[in-house]
Amino acid sequence: MLKWFNSQSRLIQIILLLIPVVNWVVEILVRWSKFFKEKGLISLIIAIVVTFFGLFVGWLDLIWCLLFKHLFLAA
């Protein structure tokens, strides 16, 4: 899912992160797929945090994506 998200144009990424409920769903899918792929402790912690506080992390990711062209801690 992270590879799919990163392959989208920046405009699509920003739109996906701008809409609150879509933002949360995208965050959950990207973070949990990254965890299941890599099995890292940081990936697990971020996935759990996003599950419960996804809207806040989504806004952080929106700003991070605007500045650095990828999601926070998901490069």
Image (cartoon, rainbow, N blue to C red):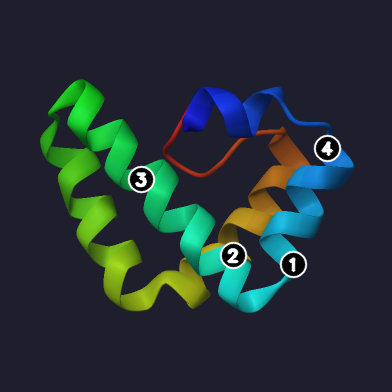
Image position, residue 59 (x, y; %): 61, 68
Left or right of 34? Residue 69 is right
Mark 2 residue crowding within 10 angstroms, few (<14) / some (14–19) / many (20+): many
Asked if the residues shown at circle 3 and circle 4 are in contact, with their CB atoms under 8 angstroms apart, the answer is: no
Amino acid at circle 1: Leu
Mark 4 residue crowding within 10 angstroms, few (<14) / some (14–19) / many (20+): some
Nearer-N-terminus badge (3/2): 2
Secondary structure found at label 4: helix
Amino acid at circle 4: Arg
Nearer-N-terminus badge (3/4): 4
In the image, residue 33 above or below residue 63:
above
Residue that label 1 marks: 18
Left or right of 68? Residue 24 is left
Left or right of 6? Residue 49 is left
Residue that label 4 marks: 10
Image position, residue 49 (x, y; %): 27, 65
